[in-house]
Every structure is written in C-alpha cells, then in structure tokens.
Amino acid sequence: MTNIGIGLVGGGYMGKAHAVALSAVGAVFDTTLRPRLEVIAATSADSAERYRSAYGFARGTDDWRGLVADPKVEAVVIASPQSTHRAIAEAAFAAGKPVFCEKPLGASLADAEAMVAAAEASGLPNMIGFNYVRSPATQFVRQLLAQGAVGELTWFRGEHTEDFLADPMLPATWRTSGRANGCMGDLAPHPINCMLALMGPVAELSARIETVHAARPGPDGSVAVDNDDHAQLMLRFASGVMGHLYISRVATGRKMGYAYEIHGTKGSIRFDQEDQNAVHLYRAEGPEATRGFTRILTGPQHPDYLAFCQGPGHGTGYQDQIIIEAKDFLTAIATGKPVWPTFRDGLAVSRIIDTAFKASDDGRWHAVPQ
C-alpha cells in the first residue's frame, strides 16, 4: 500500500460525499493507493476550517491555488461550482497532478473542450463524476447489453425527473438563474452520460427546452427565472436506434427518477434509481402465458457489490456510488491507464447539451459533433 495526498476543492454537499468516500475507499476495496486527506479548500477561511475539522483533513484553506500548488497534494478532486472547474483543472494539470472533476465538466462547451485539451496534453489520469451509472445494477445492465441479452436494440427511453422546484411558490435561488444552473446544466448530464454508456453515440437530435415557472418569489417581489425547468429530446443514435430523453426539476412526486427502458428483439430492460438495487429483465422466450419481467435484486455476483456486502438483496446506496468512483480514480492513478468516464466522455455530454439548446432554439434536427 502507498499513501497519496488528496486535495479537495469544495466542502458542501458533494465535497462531503467525496471526503467520506476517500476516507472509506481503502477499507472497502483494499486499494493499492490509500488516500491521505491533506488539504480542503472552501470560499472562506471559516468554512474551510469547519470542513477540515468535520472531514479529517490536515489543513484547510480559502485559496484553491495554494491547494493545487501544495507539494503534499498529489491528486485533486474538484467538487466546487461548475464555473470554477476549468481554472482549477487547468492549474492542476499544469502542476502535474491527476484530476477528478464533478459533473458537468465545465460551465460551457468551450470550458469542456479546454479541459479535455489540458488533460490530454498533460497525459495525466482524469475522470469525471457520473456516479449513478456506477451502481451495481446499471453496471450489470451494461454487461447484459454487451452480451446481447435482449437481442438487437430497437428503442431507448430515459429520464431524470425530480421535483425540488415543482412548487411555483418556492423562492428564487442560484439554481433559477444562469443557463449552467438550469435543468439542462444540472440534471441532464447524468442521464445523457447513461444513455451514451448504454446505447453509444448520438448521431442527431431534436429538442424542446422550456421554463415552466417564469417567475418566483424574491426578497423584493417577483424574480424572473432565466433558465430551464424541463426538456425533452428526440434522438437518433449512431446505430440507427431511436430514443427519447426527458429531464425535469418540476416533476411533482419524483425524487430521483433516473430511469431508463430499453427494448430489443429478444427482450427488454427497465431500471429506476428510486429502486436502485433492482433490474427488471424481460426475455422473449418460452410460452407466452408464462412470460413476464423478472425482478433481479443486485448481489455479490454483480459489479462492485461484494466489496460492500456479502448478502444479495441487502443493497447499496448513493454514498457507495461515490466510493466506487474513488476506487476507479485511484485505479487510474495506480495503473496509469484511463478508467471510464474520462474528461473526453464528459465532453461528449457537453456536446449533446450544446446541440440540444441549438435544436430547441430553431426547432430543427441537429447533428451532434463527434
């Protein structure tokens, strides 16, 4: 075992998740590299000290540049707002340090392109944080598709639906201002990454992106909402298969509706993150009278499950997905070989989002740059 010094930028919701994962990953997966929590950076010295004390870092700072330059920091994890991702990643690569960056890769397509250029010029390990696709269930679905379990694929439907802004009387916040903070910037990267993992590249798409609640209460009256609440995309994959994707932050009743359905010539698959430890598999075989979906509960026979629990059906959770990410990042550093998804995979997501906005603006089908 070898220790590796970690610098974490951001101590909020995702910062805490990564701090916990980095503390646990060595014990869970018996990794060759064991994280040493060196420095955590936040927007103020007080916040940094609070996070340092709570999460077990050696030092806290309000200067992310100092974190990146610190000789005891050997790898950088970015869990700060997306508008900061590019500058931090570029500085870390310039300093010769591997980078793990939360999704989306940057606040714009230009940011994502620049970050990929910096990553690939450096030759250093780089990963982007799409945690939901790492659940044992969805990893198992990828295996099923690779094995041809449902035959030739014919259709895909995906969604990421939540309701945290469904109530029109909820006040305006940072989430309701700025394109990067809208539904397409915040939620869409996850299901787009998922459909690319399951179905392959998208050739062309049509989109409608809309604001449902145009104004929200503010301290001095009504405040205009200038970003999107929900969107739908019609898709044509490079394979020729048709698909559909719906993303919403105003889907009343949905809490974590990261879900998909895939049809094939020999069967179909359904999954819903609100029941994240189950895969529903239909095989078109045997007498019609006895056919039906089989609910498969994840267990030790499924990817990355056994490290957490020896009992099938006991299940894994959200934090476990972040621990799996940490394991993959450490593996990339230890082996010097890319582990999916890299920054370039994040760029593929950014290109689809950028194309969707163009398609929504002019009402036409658009080819997706590859």
Image: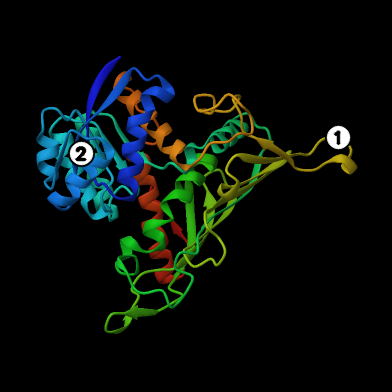
Is residue 108 in sight in this rendering? Answer: yes
Residue drawn at x 35%, y 27% as measured from the top left: 338
Residue 13 badge: none
Q: Which mark is residue 118?
A: 2
Comparing 164 with 27, the one in front is 27
Q: Residue 98, position in %: x, y?
A: 24, 31
Residue 369 pos. (x, y %): 38, 50
Q: Nearer the viewer, residue 167 or 227?
A: 167
Tag 1: amino acid = Gly
Earlier residue among tags 1 and 2: 2
Q: Residue at x 40, y 79 (%)?
A: 214
Residue 102 in sight: no
Residue 22: name its quadrant: top left
Asked if the residue under mark 2 is in contact with the one under mark 1, i.e. CB atoms within 8 Å, the reply is: no
356 or 103: nearer the eye? 103
Q: Residue furthest top?
A: 1
Q: Position of residue 211 (x, y in %)?
A: 43, 73
Residue receiving disc 1: 286
Q: Amino acid at mark 2?
A: Ala
Image height check: is 35 above or below 130? Answer: above
Number of callouts in the render?
2
Q: Position of residue 157 (x, y in %)?
A: 59, 53
Question: Crowdedness of circle 1 by 10 Å Cα count: few (<14), some, many (20+)?
Answer: few
User: Does residue 356 sit above or below 116 in this rendering?
Assistant: below
